[in-house]
Image (cartoon, grey):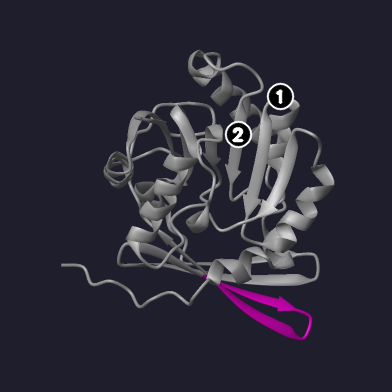
């Protein structure tokens, strides 16, 4: 039996995701790739989306600074983006409009009731919490936030590929800031230590993400009243193959 790792520091994600260093480290995120992925996803889900009169209401769960939410709004959706980090929401508010709004909220404590047709959770914005059952709380909240037959899309890391391609240590230079990143698998989670050296200042951050696989999502989603509709293995829409896929993108439907 594999022993579980020590508990992650409480709310590590609230500290790291609110940090300007997080935004700097991931500044390379490709806007064009994100838009192309959303276009493919919309096209794929169109037979379901077109059942509802426009505008289709979307919840971007853990929206960061709102890049996906803004694009969805431009595509004609009515979008609400929520994120735990006030700093991210403050930055996202610059993108706000009549059909694009943002709020600080914890996905474990949502109070929406059948307000949305579609919920998205992108760029591995799941799997952060110390206990597995906390993630089911999130899925239960999403279930209640969706209308009958509403859609959920979760874009997650592929745990098999993560195990196979893990880089134990990495050094990155972003301007004057140096990052020393250390990764290891601990039990059922990947643990990443991000050592930040900014001049004479040092800041240690951490990430702890559960290595949830296809069967884990199927089990958790089924228990909360979802049916899995399909899996993609990357942003181009290729089928999910556990041994080779870059991502684990889960599409599910509310059964109520």
Q: Look at mark 2 in the image and give the residue it sits on.
A: 58
Q: Is residue 196 rendered magenta in the image?
A: yes
Discs 2, 1 touching: Cβ within 8 Å = no
* Percent coordinates x, y for residue 84 in the rendering: 61, 60
Depicted 84 relative to depicted 227: above or below: below
Q: Quadrant of residue 7?
A: bottom left
- The residue that appears at 63% across and 50% down in the rendered structure is 82
Magenta stretch contains residue 171 = no
Q: Which mark is residue 194?
A: none
- Which of the image's four quarters has the N terminus? bottom left
What are the residue bounds of the magenta stretch? 193-206
**Residue 136: x and y, percent?**
36, 52
* Vertical position of residue 169 compared to residue 140: above or below: below
Mark 2 falls on what kind of element? strand
Instruction: Determine the residue located farthest toward the bottom in the rendered image.
Output: 200
Q: Could you tell me which residue is drawn at 48 percent across and 17 percent down?
A: 48
Using the image, determine if residue 222 lies above or below residue 47.
below
Residue placed most toward the observer, 43 or 170? 43
What residue is disc 1 on?
75
Q: Earlier in the sequence, mark 2 or mark 1?
A: 2
Image quadrant of residue 19? Answer: bottom right
Give me the residue at 67% from left, 27% from top: 77
Q: Which one is nearer the viewer's eye here, 64 or 185? A: 64
Q: Nearer the viewer, residue 12 or 188?
A: 12
- Structural crowding at the residue carrying mark 1, measured as other residues with C-alpha within 10 Å and reported as few (<14), some (14–19) or many (≥20): few
Name the residue: 84% across, 47% down: 94
């Amino acid at each position: 039996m594999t022993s579980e790792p020590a508990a992650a520091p409480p709310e590590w994600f609230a500290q790291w995701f609110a940090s300007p260093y997080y935004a700097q480290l991931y500044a390379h995120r490709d806007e064009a790739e994100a838009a192309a992925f959303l276009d493919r996803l919309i096209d794929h889900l169109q037979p379901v989306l077109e059942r509802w009169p426009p505008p289709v209401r979307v919840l971007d769960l853990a929206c960061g600074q709102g890049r996906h939410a803004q694009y969805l709004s431009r595509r004609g959706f009515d979008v609400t983006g929520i994120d735990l980090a006030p700093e991210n929401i403050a930055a996202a508010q610059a993108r706000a409009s009549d059909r694009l709004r943002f709020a600080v909220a914890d996905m474990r404590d949502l109070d929406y009731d059948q307000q949305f047709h579609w919920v998205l959770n992108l760029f591995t914005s799941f799997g952060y919490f110390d206990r597995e059952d906390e993630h089911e709380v999130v899925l239960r909240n999403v279930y209640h936030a969706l209308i009958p037959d509403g859609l959920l899309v979760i874009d997650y890391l592929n745990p098999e590929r993560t195990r196979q391609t893990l880089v134990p240590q990495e050094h990155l230079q972003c301007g004057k800031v140096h990052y020393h990143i250390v990764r290891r698998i601990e039990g059922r989670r990947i643990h990443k230590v991000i050592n930040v050296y900014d001049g004479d200042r040092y800041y240690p951050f951490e990430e702890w993400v559960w290595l949830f696989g296809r069967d884990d999502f199927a089990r958790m989603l089924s228990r909360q009243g979802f049916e899995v509709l399909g899996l993609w293995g990357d942003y181009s829409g290729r089928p999910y193959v556990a041994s080779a896929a870059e991502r684990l993108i889960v599409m599910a439907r509310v059964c109520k």
